[in-house]
């Protein structure tokens, strides 16, 4: 796949916005703060910069690994000792940047767990070049995490992104898996997850991150709402709370869409043995002899 210079420019610009949005959210993460305020801080920063969120900001606390975003009336607040993953992504004209980091609230007990995913990401990025197989990248990630005495999460992976598509093509595993060769021009979100638990996540309750499915015989108000979602969120994942703008009836309308099968929502993913999880993520563009992170200074 070839990327022209215009596409690369937009990927980089999206990367800068996503990085700063993540920084803002990290700074806002304090004891007693609401998850909702932190998520909105990041999402609003992205809109203010003229970009759009590529998905709702994920706030995953302790043994939660992914797919949690606060609802409009979510009262959860950070507590001392929490280990919080913030995953933020945005796009400019469909060119996506995705990044994540972990912070600890008010204590300093989980530095090694946090470093495990950070170091794994660094090693993975240094190893990426055209021709490397995904299992070699996964092996590097696994080894870096195990060197610190933790387990990688084997059923969460990094992913290839394409214009307006968040997860596509090649998966980048956190364990040695897959023979796919990396190619120049690929855009990859690399995201090692480390845990002191078993190393697998399982599905819990349905969360507040939604995705549009195929349109099926909708009419009237339902069709109108479906089209509004389509126009506003570009078929990328969206938060229930973003539909507030549509009007007070949005919760009922979303429920109806779910019943029709025209939207789905992702289950929240948590560590199987309730282990604590850390995560770090950058988006990279594969070049002729390595890769360049768009979400890193
Ligand atoms: Co991400």
Image: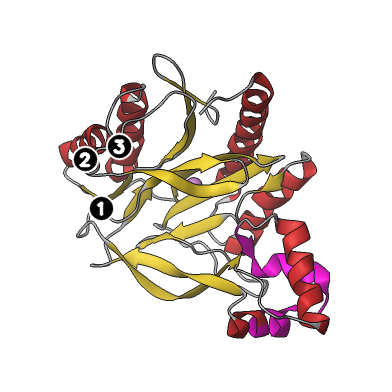
- In x, y percent, where is residue 40? 68, 56
Stretch in magenta: 237-256
Which of the two residues, 182 or 246, is positioned nearer the viewer here? Answer: 182
Q: Secondary structure at mark 1?
A: loop
- Return the residue nearer the eye: 35 or 216: 216
Toward the top, the furthest residue is 289
| Label 3, label 2: how far apart the Cα atoms are | 18 Å
Which residue is depicted at the point 61% across and 38% down? 18
Relative placement, left or right, of 293 versus 154 is right
The residue at which mark 1 appears reads as: 154
Query: In the picture, which quadrant includes the C terminus?
Result: top right
- Along the horizontal axis of the image, is 287 left or right of 251? left
The alpha-carbon separation of the residues under discs 1 and 2 comes to 9 Å
> Mark on residue 180?
3
Identify the residue shown where x is 19% and y is 60%.
198
- Element on which disc 3 rests: loop
* Residue 79 position in % (x across, y down): 47, 62
Q: Secondary structure at mark 2?
A: helix
């Amino acid at each position: 796949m070839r990327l022209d210079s215009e596409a690369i420019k937009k990927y980089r610009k999206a990367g800068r916005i996503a990085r700063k949005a993540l920084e803002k959210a990290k700074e806002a993460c304090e004891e007693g703060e609401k998850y909702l305020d932190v998520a909105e801080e990041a999402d609003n920063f992205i809109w203010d910069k003229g970009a759009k969120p590529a998905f709702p900001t994920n706030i995953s606390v302790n043994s939660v690994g992914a797919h949690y975003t606060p609802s409009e009336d979510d009262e959860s607040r950070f507590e001392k000792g929490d280990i919080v993953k913030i995953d933020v992504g945005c796009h400019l004209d469909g060119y996506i940047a995705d990044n994540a980091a972990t912070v600890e609230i008010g204590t300093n007990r989980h530095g090694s767990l946090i470093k495990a995913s950070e170091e794994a990401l660094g090693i993975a990025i240094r190893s990426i070049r055209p021709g490397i197989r995904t299992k070699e990248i996964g092996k590097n990630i696994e080894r870096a995490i195990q060197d610190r005495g933790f387990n990688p999460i084997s059923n969460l992976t990094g992913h290839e992104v394409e214009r307006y598509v968040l997860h596509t093509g090649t998966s980048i595993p956190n364990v040695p898996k897959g023979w796919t060769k990396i190619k120049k021009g690929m855009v990859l979100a690399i995201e090692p997850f480390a845990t002191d638990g078993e190393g697998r996540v399982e599905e819990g309750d349905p969360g507040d991150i939604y995705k549009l499915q195929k349109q099926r015989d909708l009419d009237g108000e339902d069709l109108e709402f479906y089209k509004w979602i389509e126009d506003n969120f570009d078929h990328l994942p969206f938060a229930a709370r973003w539909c507030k703008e549509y009007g007070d009836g949005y919760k009922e309308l979303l429920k109806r869409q779910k019943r029709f099968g025209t939207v789905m929502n992702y289950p929240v993913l948590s560590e199987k043995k309730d282990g604590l999880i850390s995560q770090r993520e950058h988006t990279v563009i594969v070049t002729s002899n390595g890769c360049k992170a768009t979400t890193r200074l």
